[in-house]
Amino acid sequence: LGRAEWQPAALEAAAFPESVASGVDPTLLRPASEEQGCAVTGRMVLQLLEAAAPPKRPPPKPPPGAMLKLAVLGRPFSSKSEHAQRLADKFGLKVLTPFSLVQSAVALAAREITTPADGGGDQAPAEMAGAAFQFVVELGGRASAALQEGSVVPDDVVAALVVAAIHEVDPVSYHGFVLDSYPETAAQAKLLEKGLTGYDPEQDKARPKGSKVAPCDDEPAPAAPPAGLDLVLRVDVSDDTARKRALGRRLDPQSGTLYHLEYDPPPDEPGLHERLVAVADAADAEVLRPALASYGDAEAPLAEWLGGLDVLLALDGESSFEGVALEAEKAVGELRERKQQREQERAAEAAKEAEAAEAEAAEAAAGWVAV
C-alpha cells in the first residue's frame, strides 16, 4: 500500500458520510480503493486519536463579574431602604422587599382563583413560568389565608418567596440583588440560608448518637457551605434617633414633597410652613413603639447568626446619610473585586486542568499508536 492511502484525506474519502454526499456533486468526490490490511488499522488508530485527544478548545472566559448577594437591615427609619436603593443603582442590583413579594404573590393567587390559567386568564409574568409560577401562586394562597385570619404571614412562606425571587433574578439585566429589610429575625435568616444553600445546623444536632455498648465512630460535623448572602449591611441608629426621624417628617399636600424639620427642613417659601402636615403612618407612636421593641428583641440573636456566617457589617447610621452610603459602597466595591478575582482564579485553574487532561489523553493515545 502506498503512503497516500494512510493520509487522512484518503481515509476520509473512503467513508464519506452519505448524508453529506447526497448534497454534493458526485464528480467532486474522489473514488477510493477498498480498504484492506493496514488501511483498516490506520482508520482505527485515527478514530482512537480523535476519541482520546479531541481538538484543543480555548480556555473558558472568566465571567464579567460574580453576582453580588446583599441585604440591608436596620431599625425603622434608619434609612435602610434608601441605602439599599442607592447600592442597587450604583452596582446594578435588583431590590427585593418581602412586602412587595408577598403582595405580588397574593395578587397572583387571587387572579388564579378568578381567572385560572387553563380558563384563558392572564398568563404568568414573563420572568416566571411553569412550576415556579405555580409554586408562587401556592405560597400566595397561604399568605392570603393568613392575612384574612388576621395573622402574620408565616416565616417559611416569606422565606420561600424570597428564595424564589432570588432564583428569578436575571444575570443579564442585573449583577446581583439586595434584600431590603430582610431577614429581620434569626429564624427568618436560618430559613433563608436553608433555602439558598441547604445548610441547616438543626439537622446536625439531630444526628443519632452511638450508645456506650456500640458507640458510633466520631465523625466531624459536615462543614457549612458558603453563606447564601455575601454581605449583610446593618445601619445602626438608636431608638431616640429613629423616633426623631419618624416624628419630624412633614408633607406638603400641594406638591407631595416630604420634608423633615431637623434633617431636611422645608425652604422659607410663603405659605409652605402653614400647609405642612405631619406624616402619621409608621411614625404613629402606637405603631413605632412595638416596631422598635420587636427589632430590639431580635437584634442580638440575628447578629449572632449572621456573625457566625461572617457576613455582617455594622454601619454607624447616626452619621450623615452620605457618609454611611460611601462606607457601604466601599464595602460592596471591595467585595465585588474579591469575587471577581476568585472567579478569574477558578477559570484559570479550570483551564489548566483541561490542558492537563488533554495532554494526558494525547499521551495515552500515543501509547495506543505505539502498540
Image (spheres, grey):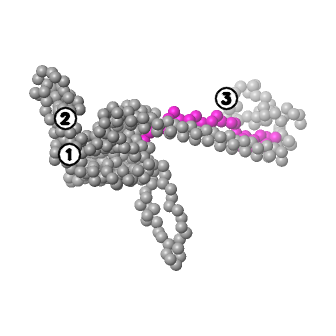
- Locate residue 35, reporting x and y percent: 83, 39
Q: Residue at x 51, y 58 (%)?
A: 222
Tell me: 306 left or right of 284: right
Q: Answer yes or no: is residue 152 visible.
A: yes
Nearer to the camera, 203 or 113 = 203
Crowdedness near tag 3: few (<14), some (14–19) or many (≥20) residues, C-alpha within 10 Å: few
Q: Nearer the viewer, residue 298 or 145?
A: 298
Task: Between label 3 and label 1, give the one nearer the viewer.
Answer: 1
Left or right, residue 336 beside residue 75: right
Q: Position of residue 230 (x, y in %)?
A: 44, 44
Query: Circle 1 — which element?
Result: helix
Q: Which residue has dot 1 on it?
A: 288
Helix, strand or loop at mark 3: loop
Does residue 195 show up? no
Taking depth in this image into account, of 23 and 11 the one nearest to the observer is 11
Q: Mark 1 or 2 closer to N-term?
A: 2
Which residue type does callout 3 highlight?
Gly
Which sits earlier in the primary sequence, circle 3 or circle 1? Answer: 3
Name the residue carrying label 2: 249
Quadrant for residue 199, please give it: bottom left
Residue depicted at 16% across the width and 28% down the height: 252
Determine whether 324 is above or below 367 in the image: above
The quadrant of the image that shows the N terminus is: top right
Q: Which residue is mark 3?
A: 23
Between circles 3 and 2, the one closer to the viewer is: 2
- Seen from this angle, which residue lies furthest right? 1
Q: Are marks 3 and 2 in contact (CB under 8 Å)?
A: no
Q: Specify start and end residues of the magenta stretch as a single range.
A: 42-69
